[in-house]
Image (spheres, coloured by chain):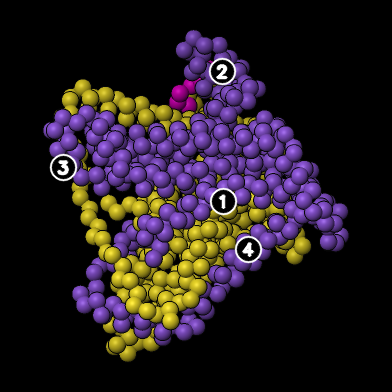
Amino acid sequence: MAAVAPVVPVRKRRRRRPIDSDTVTVGRSGAGTLFANLAAIGFIVVMAFPVYWVLNTAFKPSNEILRFEPTFVPMSPTFDNFKSAFNAPFFQQDLLNSVIITLGAVAGAIVVGFLAALAIARFQFYGRKAIILIVLGVQMVPLVALLIPLYLMMQGLGRTKELPGVIIVYIVLILPYTVWTLRGFISGIPRELDEAALIDGCTRAQVFWRIILPLTGPGLVATSVYGFIQAWNEFIIINTFNDQAQQNLMAWLLQNQTQRGTFWGPLMAGSILTAIPVVIFFLIIQRNIATGLTAGAVKG
Amino acid sequence: MSVASPSAPTRPTPPGPPAPGAHVRRKRRSSRSGGFVPYGLALPALFLLFALLGYPMVRMIVLSFQNMRLRELFNGLTPPWVGLDNYTRTLTDSVFWTVALRTTIFTVVSVALTVVIGLGVAMLMRRVAPSLRIAMIVVMMFVWAMPQLVATQIFRWLVDADFGVINYLLTLLGLDYESHSWFAEPLEGWSVITALVVWAGIPFIAITLNAGLTQVPKELLEAATVDGASPWQAFRNITLPILKQLIVIVTTLSVIWNFGLFTQPWVMRDGRPSSDYQTLATYAYSTAFKTNNYSLGSAISVITVILLAAVMVFYIRQMFKIGDVD
């Protein structure tokens, strides 16, 4: 039978120490530290430069942009580029589409993904390992490779050139990560809590509503935000499936480049407007993304 | 709410009741009384995954043995079967081999650069002043958060032939880069694309490895230094072995991501990359959607997935080995 004495998982204690106490100080010279600090400053400048440059460009009037010798701060700062991007054809329509598609996809993926995560995290059943394998495996198939059959399938079902088709595809796009991350959050809740509640007379459904769901709350938020980022950033699928009126903001950014030639100011302003929601959300949940991707590898 | 704090995915549950018998009984109960419940819970997710990932995967393989063109797309008839024609056509096509070789070289170079620089940055973060370390983390977070498409647009603008700031800066250094087109010469164009991919890839690796470095016991490094080990020896014999597993994982992930490179060359070349700027992913896409040769595109995709399969299997095995997948 499947239920022969399960192996008790080895439990490792996780310790968190202040960063500074870890720094090795023995045998380090002042010159070495100076050199390290200078290298860090160099690294910061190089990494930050592109980000700084897009902000710098977006606030310049076009006569300041279109010259070989650039100004390193906008001499006469202006919001014209942002206005022009915002009022560009399809921008507002595609912004609305982005919001609808992303919310729809995240809501769908969270509901479906949470149930599957619950099954994997809380039950031992035949085929459990296979499900984990599927969830981990499909994450790695290059999306572009599946684009051809997906397009033919959606085209056959008459689901191209509309939002619901894309929403369903996006649900599946973010589902594996959602299941995988939520599984981690649910396994983090001690089983003893479930059992205590069961002994006290709760039904399984009550355990779910009163214990697991509230305790997974922060995990649900973090996972939704990451799903939001993935869905918001996608443009290859939607650009292949839909026309401009049913596209999202990322696809708008792509179209804007290829159709109207390159107007750098509005393009950079449009890039900023498109990236802002993602950057903000990313900064909120950044800790989870690394841990989700490398799973148990970091036991700091 | 400490149980489900943001770092919960990697945090094992605190030790349960000490008696081993309790564990056995507990597990058995949850496995028995579950019945069909777990299947019911997993069903919607499995249905979606099979319908929108499993079925297309099968369809992709079937398509690669057919000859699907625009006509079949619109009249909905079964395309004619052509056996292995698409594969023989692809595998005897010198363009395909050039593209495959280019994708491989790009992957090796970009992953090596990202991992080596990322490791260097992670080590650097532990040596610098705390304020600089925070600045490094903040900058890397912004870079990491940047959507691929937006990052590509920014780099396109940085290297613009007429008004790009890179040409200006190089001219300041006394080089003649006025109106220099970075994409006329494929090697230069690929340097730009590699720079973009490495720039965008460093934060994930540096921040992950920096977290891993907290596992390296300070006492061990100090003892080694006192015993006369050079910094290189300490790195080689203490830090590297402890980080090994983590490095393997981030490298594998980077290989999978970079081998599927699509957005950067696609957007840099305005959605019409010339044959010098094709990767396997853009090549399959162009074949399918620009020339409406869906079957040939599918065959190229199938070959791409097969080329990557070894790396994917390796990654999944690593995940199981680490033990997070129990």
- The chain assigned the colour yellow in the figure is A
In the image, residue B19 above or below residue A17: below
Disc 3 residue crowd, few under 14, some 14–19, many 20+, Cα 10 Å: few
Residue at image mark 3: B219
Q: Does the magenta stretch include residue B161?
A: no
Disc 4: CA contacts within 10 A as few (<14), some (14-19) or many (>=20): some
Task: Look at label 2 and name its amino acid.
Answer: Phe
As helix, strand or loop, the secondary structure at mark 4 comes to helix
Residue visible at 49% across and 9% down in the picture: B174
Q: Which residues are the magenta region?
A: A67-74
Tell me if residue A68 is in the magenta stretch: yes
In the rendered image, residues at marks 2 and 3 fall on the same chain:
no
Whether residue A113 can be seen here = no
Few, some or many residues within 10 Å of mark 2 (<14, 14–19, 20+): some
Query: Of discs 2 and 1, which sits in the foreground?
Result: 1
Residue B54: mark: 4
Left or right: A101, with B271 as reference point = left
Q: Distance between the residues labelled 2 and 3?
A: 55 Å
User: Marks 2 and 4: in contact by CB < 8 Å?
Assistant: no
Residue B52 sits in which quadrant? bottom right
**Quadrant of the drawing holding the C terminus of chain B:** bottom left
- Expressed as whole percent of the image width and height from the top left, the position of residue A255 reads 67, 42
Q: Which amino acid does label 4 sit on?
A: Gly
Disc 1: which residue: B309
Q: Residue A68 carries which label?
A: 2
Q: In which quarter of the image is the N terminus of chain B?
A: bottom left
The earlier-in-sequence mark between 1 and 4 is: 4
Q: Nearer the viewer, mark 1 or mark 3?
A: 1
